Image (cartoon, rainbow, N blue to C red):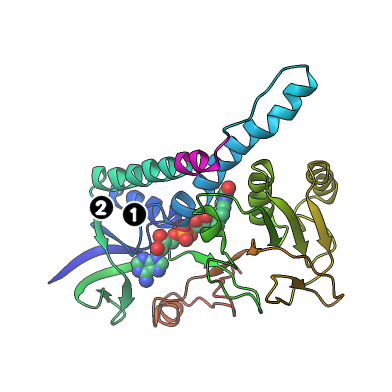
């Protein structure tokens, strides 16, 4: 079955679903194709569940401050699984909200993996075809692997795997002290993980203001988190000891808290799209605004 639209958006993350709704509001016949859940990384395995966990971790961390004020605070029975469940509920509720908004604004929703069959035809799951005058590729990104640390989601976890754990590990190493690594670190530390964070750059939160980053580091250290900065982790051994060129190692379960890599899995899409839209993509699938 082939349907023709004014515009088809690939990917129902924050980039895609907002564009689709706006297009429909402006009178275009719009369709959105999503291979996973509405809301993309942000709502399902990114911003929303992580902020839910951070909020709950903040409540736990606040217990110390209350004790300092003389309050008797009893944390017995504290159960990370309950925090995890709340984070999933928040993610699912918002994902359903996006689906509702798409419907309300008369955007056709197609579940499935899209790939271009031609400059005007999109194949969904290799079967259904949709034709459009214009396309928006909003396929987002996925967690970036580091050399020597392939994700198996048991020993080496991506941020997605880490967010889907129902209990926190006793000990862990987080690779990368960027926003994602530090956020995960904050949550796990509050729930009792003994944590080391390794960062290749010479300071934590290398993209943020240096003075603010130093304050954050100090606060983490006060809560028992150890940092190894200026050290690139190159692999790990059978005992889960992380290797760095300086030979430093910790016996922990490694976790990746690295950034994201652009999704290029829409076979042929990026090349085709860059030809159509005259855009160039870098080695990581990134686009430039120049
Ligand atoms: C742990 C974590 C925490 C984060 N916290 C924050 C935060 O607090 N604040 C913030 O601003 N950002 C945060 N981010 C980043 C944020 O999630 C992304 O910037 C945002 O999701 C990007 O939106 P997007 O629509 O471009 O892509 P995505 O959200 O990645 O959505 C792309 C969608 O495209 C779909 N797709 C891909 N290929 C195909 C295909 N071939 N066919 C059909 N569908 C396809 C995917 O399934 C996905 O649903 C966080 C990210 C992570 C991982």
| Residue located beneath label 1 in the image | 20
Task: Work out whether residue 51 or residue 87 is closer to the camera in this orientation and state it.
Answer: 87
Mark 2 in CB contact with mark 1 (< 8 angstroms)? yes
x and y percentages locating residue 41 in the rendered image: 47, 56
Circle on res. 107:
2
Q: As displayed, is residue 251 above or below residue 278?
A: above
Going by the image, does 195 lie left or right of 262? right
The reply to whether the magenta stretch includes residue 214 is no
- The N terminus lies in which quarter of the figure? bottom left
x and y percentages locating residue 167 in the rendered image: 54, 49
Determine which quarter of the picture holds residue 3: bottom left
Point 78% across, 65% down: residue: 250
Circle on res. 171:
none
Q: Secondary structure at mark 1?
A: helix
**Secondary structure character of the magenta stretch overall:** helix
Task: Work out whether residue 180 or residue 233 is closer to the camera in this orientation and state it.
Answer: 233
User: Mark 1 or mark 2, which is nearer the start of the sequence?
Assistant: 1
């Amino acid at each position: 079955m082939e349907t023709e639209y004014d515009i088809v958006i690939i990917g129902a993350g924050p980039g895609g679903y907002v564009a689709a709704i706006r297009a429909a509001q402006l009178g275009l016949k719009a369709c959105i194709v999503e291979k996973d859940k509405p809301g993309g990384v942000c709502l399902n395995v990114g911003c929303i569940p992580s902020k839910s966990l951070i909020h709950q971790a903040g409540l736990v961390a606040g217990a110390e401050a209350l004790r300092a004020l003389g309050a008797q605070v009893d944390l017995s029975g504290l159960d990370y699984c309950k925090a995890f469940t709340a984070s999933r509920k928040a993610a699912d509720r918002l994902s359903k909200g996006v689906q509702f908004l798409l419907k309300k604004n008369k955007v056709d929703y197609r579940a499935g993996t899209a790939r271009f069959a031609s400059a005007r035809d999109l194949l969904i799951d290799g079967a259904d075809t949709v034709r459009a005058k214009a396309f928006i590729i909003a396929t987002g990104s996925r967690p970036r692997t580091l050399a020597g640390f392939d994700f198996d989601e048991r020993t080496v976890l991506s941020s997605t795997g880490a967010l889907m754990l129902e209990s926190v590990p006793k000990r862990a190493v987080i690779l990368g002290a960027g926003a994602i690594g530090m956020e995960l670190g904050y949550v796990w530390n509050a729930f009792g993980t003994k944590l080391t964070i390794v960062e290749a750059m010479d300071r934590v939160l290398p993209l943020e203001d240096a003075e603010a980053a130093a304050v954050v580091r100090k606060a983490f250290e006060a809560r028992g988190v150890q940092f190894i900065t200026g050290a690139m982790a190159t692999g790990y051994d059978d005992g889960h000891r992380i290797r760095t060129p300086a030979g430093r190692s910790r016996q922990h379960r490694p976790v990746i808290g690295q950034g994201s890599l652009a999704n290029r899995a829409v076979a042929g899409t990026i090349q085709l799209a860059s030809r159509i839209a005259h855009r160039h993509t870098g080695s990581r699938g990134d686009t430039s605004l120049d």
